[in-house]
Amino acid sequence: MALISPEDQEALKKLFGEKLTDDVNITYFTQHESPLIVPGHHECSYCKETGEILEEVTSLSDKLHLIVKDFVKDEKEAEQMDITRIPAYTMQGKNKGKVRFFGLPAGYEFSTLLQSIIDVSTGETQLSQKSKEALNKVEQNLQVQVFVTPT
Amino acid sequence: MAVENEHVTADVVEVSEFVELAQRYNVQGVPKTVVNDTVEFVGALPEPRFVQQVLQAAEKKEKK
């Protein structure tokens, strides 16, 4: 069964149709579920659900593309994006910096996911002109980590 | 912010799945924002304040 209801799928199709201007690649790092239970090995708790949500969301617009990578096998790509834990996904479109998500995009995080897709597609943000100007002056690397819960 | 500037990495971390990280940054309330391990604040700030806080981390780095 789909995680996103048919009504919501229709609403999202409409939203993406109106708002998305450029293609967005979402690279998702996951792991394959092992049929074996290995002591000391941590199964990725929400990889399956995260993958399903991303698949459903990206199927709602032809501008959205999902690239699935294996955290272990595609170690080099994970390293390039500095992905050290999963589930994780990154977005590439008209964004200049890196946009990364760690964990299942449920609850409020689902709307963060949608807004990020739109921002990355258009390259436009809702930041004020003053903030944009201040940000343009930044020449050193800044890692902004926002810790959230789904509720 | 990461859309606007190539030097910015924006991470969203779900705390219940990454408890270890939440403990490292002593996350007791959400949303909690940590910039370059030097600036941190809890709660949703109005946009100008948020940007100002993040830029503080850039200034701190410059001073070193």
Image (cartoon, rainbow, N blue to C red):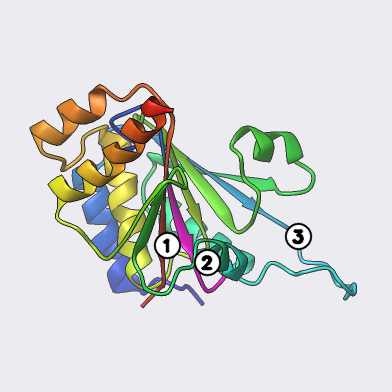
**In this view of the protein, which residue sits in the foreground, A23 or A146?**
A146
Q: Quadrant of residue A113?
A: bottom left
User: What kind of element bears circle 1?
Assistant: strand
User: What kind of element bears circle 2?
Assistant: helix
User: Is residue A104 on the magenta stretch?
Assistant: no
User: What kind of element bears circle 3?
Assistant: loop
* Mark 1 vs 2: CB contact within 8 A: yes
* Circle 3 crowding by C-alpha within 10 Å: few under 14, some 14–19, many from 20: few
Residue at which label 2 appears: B22
Q: Residue at x 39, y 32 (%)?
A: A93
Q: Residue furthest left?
A: A129
Q: Which residues are magenta?
A: B11-17
Chain letter of the residue beneath label 3 in the structure image: A
User: Is residue B15 on the magenta stretch?
Assistant: yes
Q: Respond whether the residues carrying marks 2 and 3 are from the same subunit.
A: no
**In this view of the protein, which residue sits in the foreground, A63 or B43?**
B43
Residue at which label 1 appears: A147
* Residue type highlighted by circle 3: His
How far apart are the alpha carbons under marks 1 and 2? 8 Å
Residue A27 picture location, percent across and down: 55, 43
Chain letter of the residue beneath label 2 in the structure image: B
Chain letter of the residue beneath label 1 in the structure image: A
Residue A32's mark? Answer: 3
**Can residue B6 be seen from the camera position used here?**
no
* Residue type highlighted by circle 1: Phe
Q: Residue at x 50, y 66 (%)?
A: A104
Q: Nearer the viewer, mark 2 or mark 3?
A: 2
